[in-house]
Image (cartoon, rainbow, N blue to C red):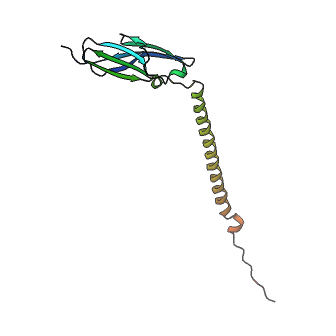
Amino acid sequence: LYEQVSTPEIKVLNWTQENGNCSLTLACEVEKGDHVAYSWREETGADPPISANSSHLHLSLGPQHVHNVYVCTVSNPISNHSQTFTPGSVCMPDPPELRPWGLYVGLSSGAVIGVILTLKVAVLLLRRRGKANHYQPTTEAKSLTIYAQVQK
């Protein structure tokens, strides 16, 4: 009597990325089932298995292959289940040079906006100070001069 296999879970054991290439090791794991056989294939139709009877798969991929789909199938004499995995969920296809570019643009834009706001505040403060000085009467205006008409 056999126990049915459970739906497998694919875990990334380790991965590295350099020069646009991504290397990773995947593990296909089941919680339940006995006499389990493992098979890995690329999901492009009826391709032959790329790894037979191993729960682990090692991939070394160029940027054009990170969106390929890989399938782990677990089976025993009474059941089988499959699970898919796309390396693009781990491997970044963008070259690393493009990532800091966005950061530099964001920081530069923030700095320009900060300078503009600082200048606006300075101009407003200077205008207020100028208006305040303009409306203060001078010492000459404070003394009252009285003119009288003298008749002969």
Q: Residue 74 at what x, y percent from top left?
A: 32, 17
Residue lying at the far front in this picture: please name it.
46
Q: Residue 81 at what x, y percent from top left?
A: 31, 21
Q: Is residue 111 above or below residue 26?
A: below
Q: 100 and 18: which one is in front?
A: 18
The residue located at (70%, 68%) in the rendering is 141
Quarter of the rendering containing residue 5: top left
Left or right for 1, reference 104: left
Quadrant containing the C terminus is bottom right
The residue located at (39%, 15%) in the rendering is 40
The residue located at (58%, 32%) in the rendering is 102
Left or right for 45, reference 2: right
Residue lying at the far bottom in this picture: please name it.
152
Q: Is residue 100 above or below residue 22?
A: below
Quarter of the rendering containing residue 128: bottom right
The residue located at (63%, 45%) in the rendering is 116
Residue lying at the far right in this picture: please name it.
152
Q: 28 and 51: which one is in front?
A: 51
